[in-house]
């Protein structure tokens, strides 16, 4: 029987062309997430699946197909909290991801959000487009100067480190971080004793931890209350790491000065309250959205597929 591959969303053309040249592939046309019925059918009909964010391969899905044909979920993306890895492996399905390829692009978006929020760029553009800009004056739209400020990074993995490097070497920012262990860095950095201490000490708090049960609502009302009223929070991790309702409350009460968000707890739904706030920058999950990065991610996923079908060691097993 010829091995079959399913790609659950359209990919960059170079990735699709390679997939068609090397594999017996079906590329799903829809950009929407897969339904549970689609996922169970796919597990039974394909040897390898390339899913991505939102394709919720839960324990319940695997319970429907206890002995699936599928041998590998080659996730398109570094985050894989939408896949129950334990349930997958219990069913004989391995899981891989695409680390490394996303690091710089995601760090760039974090810096974009930091600058846009601190310098009120979104608010200013809306003013200009609405035709309400009356011209320059000395006290117009004064924001925060990032240079020399104190940045707190929650999670100093590949992406967190890339953000900190940009902030320190590009803007002279002081770096503190929260991690399970001390990290060796190319810049001066202080490891915080706990999250509340970190939140209380910084001007900008950036979230760069993986999603999943361990980090669900890691940033809750107590963390937001610990932050200074002039401080901002930026999230490029997973939306559910922040308690979105608590964030709305903190912003409405002025407990923090602003937020820059690329991800949302119930994505693609974004609370109306966040949309109405001028001190919040909202991006539509652009973290890895460059041609080069999405192409590299696709090729990395296909490398995992090729290794699986050849019986070789998986390059990026999670």
Image (cartoon, rainbow, N blue to C red):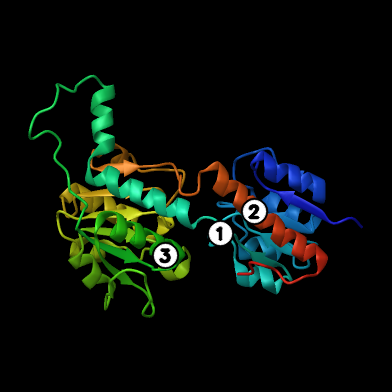
**Circle 2 is placed at which residue position?**
51
Q: Is residue 213 left or right of residue 94?
A: left
Q: Are circles 2 and 1 on residues that touch, CB within 8 Å?
A: yes
Between 162 and 129, the one lying in front of the other is 162
Q: Is residue 253 left or right of residue 99?
A: left
Callout 3 secondary element: loop
Callout 1 secondary element: loop
Q: Badge 3 local density, few (<14 within 10 Å), some, or many (20+)?
A: many
**Circle 1 is placed at which residue position?**
82
Residue 27 in view in this figure: no
Which residue is the extreme one toward the right? 1
**Circle 3 is placed at which residue position?**
209
- Judged by depth in the image, the label closer to the viewer, 2 or 1, is 2
Q: Is residue 104 left or right of residue 279?
A: right
- Judged by depth in the image, the label closer to the viewer, 2 or 3, is 3
> Which tag, 1 or 3, sits closer to the chain's start?
1
Label 2 – label 1 distance at C-alpha? 10 Å
- Judged by depth in the image, the label closer to the viewer, 1 or 3, is 3
Q: Badge 2 local density, few (<14 within 10 Å), some, or many (20+)?
A: many
Residue 160 in view in this figure: yes
Counting from the top left corner in percent of width and height, residue 231 is at 19, 55
Between 71 and 272, the one lying in front of the other is 71
Counting from the top left corner in percent of width and height, residue 2 is at 89, 55
């Amino acid at each position: 029987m010829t091995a079959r591959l399913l790609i659950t969303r359209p990919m960059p053309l170079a990735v699709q062309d390679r997939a068609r040249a090397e594999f017996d592939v079906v590329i799903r046309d829809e950009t929407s997430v897969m339904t549970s019925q689609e996922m169970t059918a796919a597990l039974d009909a394909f040897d390898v699946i390339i899913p991505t964010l939102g394709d919720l391969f839960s324990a319940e899905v695997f319970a429907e197909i206890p002995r699936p044909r599928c041998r590998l979920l080659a996730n398109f993306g570094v985050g894989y909290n939408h896949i129950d890895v334990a349930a997958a492996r219990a069913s004989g399905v391995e899981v891989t991801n695409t680390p490394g390829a996303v690091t710089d692009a995601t760090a760039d978006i974090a810096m974009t959000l930091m600058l846009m929020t601190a310098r009120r760029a979104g608010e200013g553009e809306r003013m200009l487009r609405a035709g309400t800009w009356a011209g320059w004056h000395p006290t117009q739209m004064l924001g925060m100067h990032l240079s020399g400020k104190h940045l707190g990074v929650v999670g100093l993995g590949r992406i967190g480190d890339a953000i900190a490097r940009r902030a320190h070497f590009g803007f002279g920012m002081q770096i503190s971080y929260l991690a399970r262990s001390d990290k060796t860095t190319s810049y001066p950095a202080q490891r915080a004793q706990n999250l509340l201490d970190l939140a209380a000490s910084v001007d900008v708090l950036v979230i760069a931890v993986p999603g999943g049960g361990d980090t669900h609502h890691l940033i809750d009302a107590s963390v937001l209350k610990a932050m200074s009223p002039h401080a901002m929070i930026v999230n490029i991790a997973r939306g559910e790491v922040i308690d979105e309702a608590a964030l709305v409350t903190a912003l409405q009460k002025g407990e923090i000065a602003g937020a820059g968000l690329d991800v949302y707890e119930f994505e693609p739904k974004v609370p109306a309250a966040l949309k109405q706030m001028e001190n919040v920058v909202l991006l539509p999950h652009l973290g890895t959205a460059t041609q080069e990065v999405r192409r590299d991610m696709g090729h990395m996923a296909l490398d995992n597929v090729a290794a699986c079908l050849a019986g070789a060691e998986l390059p990026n097993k999670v």
